[in-house]
Image: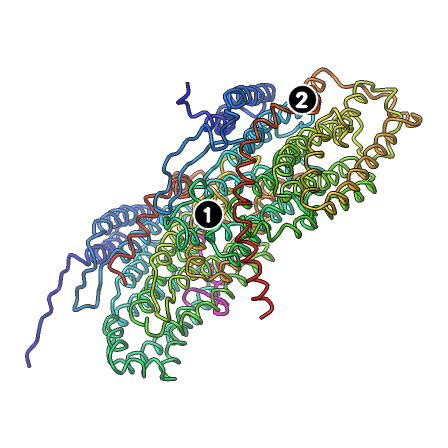
Amino acid sequence: MSNMPLLTMITFLPAAGAVIIMLFMKKEQTKAIKGFATAVAVLDFLISLPLWFRFDQSEAGFQFVEKVSWIPTIGVSYFVGIDGISVLLVLLTTLTMIIGVVCSFTAIEEREKEYYVCLLLLATGMLGTFIALDIFLFYVFFEITLVPMYFLIGVWGGPRKLYAAIKFFLYTLFGSVLMLLGILAFYFANLKMGTGTLTFDLVELYGVGPKIPLSLQIWIFLAFFIGFAIKVPMFPFHTWLPDAHVEAPTAGSVILAGILLKMGTYGFVRFALPLLPQASHVFVPFMMLLSIIGIIYGALVAMAQTDIKKLVAYSSVSHLGFVMLGVFALNEQGVLGGQLQMINHGISTGALFLLVGVVYERRHTRLISDYGGLSKVVPVFTVIFAITMLSSIGLPGLNGFVGEFLILIGAFKKSYVYAAFAVIGIVLGAAYMLWLFQRVFFGTLDNPENEKLTDCNAREVLYLLPLVILMFWIGLYPKPFLGRMEASVKKVVKMVNAAEVPQKAALGKLTKLEKK
Amino acid sequence: MQVVIPDIALSLALPEIGLAILVCAVLILDLFVSLENKSRVGVVAFVGVVILALVAFGQWGEGARTTFSGFYVVDNLSVFVKVSVLLCTAISILLLLQYAKVEKINFGELYAMLLFSVFGMLVMASGNDLISIYLGLETMSISIYVLVAFMRHDPLSREAGLKYFLMGAFASGVLLYGMALTYGFTGTTSIRGIAAAFAGSGGPAIAQNPMMIFGLILLVAGFGFKLALSPFHMWLPDAYTGAPTPITGFMSVAVKFATVAALMRIFFVALPAMADRWNTLLWALTAFTLVWGNVAAIAQTSLKRMLAYSSIGHAGYVLMGVVATMSVVDGKVTFTDIGISAVAFYLLAYLFTNLGAFGMLILVCRDGYRGDNIEDWKGIGQAHPWAGMAFVVFLLSLGGIPPTAGFVGKLYLFAAAVQNEYYWLAVIGLVMSAVSMYYYGRIIMVMYMENRGEGQEVMSLSSAPSLFFALVVLVVATLLLGIFPGSFLDAAKGTVAGFI
């Protein structure tokens, strides 16, 4: 049992399912296809559960490691494994996949076969991104996810789907090709100054960063920054996100918000910080500034939205600003909070998109002004929405609070200015969410269309319930989650701070150079 | 006078000799085959080419050996190019079998001319002397002028042939003049001899001579024309669009292979003394080609024309590898293996990918209908899922998205550029590869995301087994090179042995 290539199985099971659907199922057998896709997603989640139970919390390094030589000519290996930083993201992905499949049963009514094939292929790409410990392998998976998502938005999207799909594709591709340049620069820097071997192996490369001169580190960091910041997306690279979210089908939005955006923040924690420690320190003020602009700007723009889905999309910009704020506090609390907030955002915002999808399916409108007084017609829906909204705001007792609290501590330790600005974002976050809730659920039920609304059915409650449970669980007893992440986060923070002392001298040199 | 008969190892030229025999056999066979059965001539040519590819492959890995008094060299690079060109020819013949019938150009001469041009390419790949290289180049070019104009009933094809001929002849002249100047200064046409002349005591003076520099510019311009690098690409869109589609695919790949091999031999082996100069020229051409080819492709509505422009862009990528081969360490010019092997691998990836893309265009050709407008492809993804997926694979590979051959090829090229510190070239190349996904992605969009209007029927596909077989091979190869590139990368690396 312990020798089974568990991570490989988890990653490639969805792809295998997709191939089976493609080859053996006719497109008219929609029921069979839905059933099969659900079975694959559930099975994938089940086999990913040992990652939760058999995960060694005290171990900071990688676990469940598999390594096979792949392209020895250029030093590429199939090297996968997880640590505290990725374990929860992998589990969140497998869980989100079930939800993504189940929530599409009635929402997607044409070309179902291709739809579920795309969803499952997307799952493989995302899981691969989180488990890859070879930078080449990571990049391959990182890029592969673009293709199914492009199809999901472009084929099953809303009225402006073509524009949104190509914008999403090109924008993120543009970022990732520049990141590739950074990866290659690091690869050759390692050849010249590091281990002296051609390798993409992350474990070998982790110690190399401090040996690279700061000037080169800064360039590499910029390349990584563009790639990951577009994916996150950080202000000012966020413009593709609202378009993609609004046009994508519900499952697409859930996956986009829940998982795909995390590939950017995860990239920073996994690659940018430990590989380029000195440069990371140099960029702290810059990153903090962009994060804070993102937090406040995202919240303000969200407040002005008339479309619920767009509001949630902009709230993502704000929330991910928080994540980045925590990560670039470069201390334990900040990074830990950022990590947890990634998961929290996946849960809360994923749930919000699902809820928007639920009403959209019934009313075919997402305009806030078309609703009002819904609490009287759809009580169950209202309760779930309320919990989700409060979790997104960060009410104590729910998951959002724990993450935001840790992030604020981290930011405060770096500088109270950062924390002060971030708090404004929390206030604004509460404002737009509560205002949204008030306009949609309270007030008079003046639109006769809304009187005919039916409450959540069993299937909908079923796929929302796990998320609600997680909101309470993380909110009330976050220890199992934080405990799993802690050791690895400490290790990353140690790696990025180990180089701090020489960094100041180097910085002095750099400023001198600039003066010259 | 004493006549010295040089030692000639004919066995080294076995693929060329075999090809010459094959051409004659095809021409004679053509006399005895009735007009309806000309495909049989094609089948004979196909079988012959496959056998020759195996023969050529047999010469791999035996080091550099020269024959015909040093006119001719067989090393790993030439073997790699020969095998690839023959492979490309074999697949092109498969594509031709169906297309020639549809377009009513199924004559024996078609296959004979194709093989003639291949003969020229093989000579170019092995040319170790300016004269043998030029002979190969002309044999190749003249045959291809004819092939481009082969659809005599189609004015576009005639126009394309004429344009290509005029520009090509001019370019050959330019190239020849460059070679003549080089000969004038060094007193020899032998590749090694030229290098020796530059390395000798008078070398630095020659390298500084303005007329020699002019000669070098002419060489670069001549190759620029042949490879269609911007700004020498003007003939290409028309020639590629007018030519029979399989020929377009064939020339976009095979001509690049042979010309780049000759270019590398002349510049790397004969003229390393002037490396800083030609490298700068090629750098500028590469940057310009990358930008122009990819940006101009965006505006095209004809698929064939779009692929024509995209092939300009890809010539830019290939040349990027050539440029990135040179590295200056402590003021001393060296040529690194990674650039050459990246060029070799990229060309191989491009072979399968681009032939595949053109194969898709052939798949929809029917009597008098070419399905060339991008709008014609609406709804293909739903009506013909397998064909749609094959096209998606080729397009992603052209754009350099994993897990396809094009991704590994581009990665390797960029790696070469980064290692030898051509950062800006790498940035241009990377950005342009994102730009290229705009127009490749547009084809995917039309196939899958736009629906046909009322009453418009989705195009039907040809069911020719030869075409089907070729496309399956191409898809599998494109994915194989993307997922398990190991042994191909090793082969590409092996091309360096004995070359420089």
The quadrant in which residue B215 appears is bottom left
Chain at tag 2: A
Magenta residues (range)? B226-245
Q: Residue at x 50, y 46 (%)?
A: A275
Q: Residue at x 42, y 73 (%)?
A: B221
- Mark 2 vs mark 1, CA separation in Å: 45 Å
Q: In the rendering, at what x and y percent does residue B310 appear?
A: 51, 56
- The residue carrying pointer 1 sits among few (fewer than 14), some (14 to 19) or many (20 or more) residues within 10 Å by Cα, namely many
Q: Residue at x 29, y 82 (%)?
A: B185
**Disc 2: which residue:** A477
> Which element is circle 1 on?
helix
Amino acid, disc 2: Tyr
Chain at tag 1: B
Q: In the rendering, at what x and y percent does residue B500 appear?
A: 28, 63
For this view, does A14 lie left or right of residue B55?
right
B321 or B376, which is in the foreground? Answer: B321
Please indicate, yes or no, whether residue B466 appears anywhere in the rendered image: no
The quadrant in which residue B207 appears is bottom left
For this view, does B118 lie left or right of residue A138?
left
Is A372 drawn above or below residue A281 in the view shown? above
B429 or A176, which is in the foreground? Answer: A176
**Disc 1: which residue:** B407
Callout 2–callout 1 Cβ contact below 8 Å: no
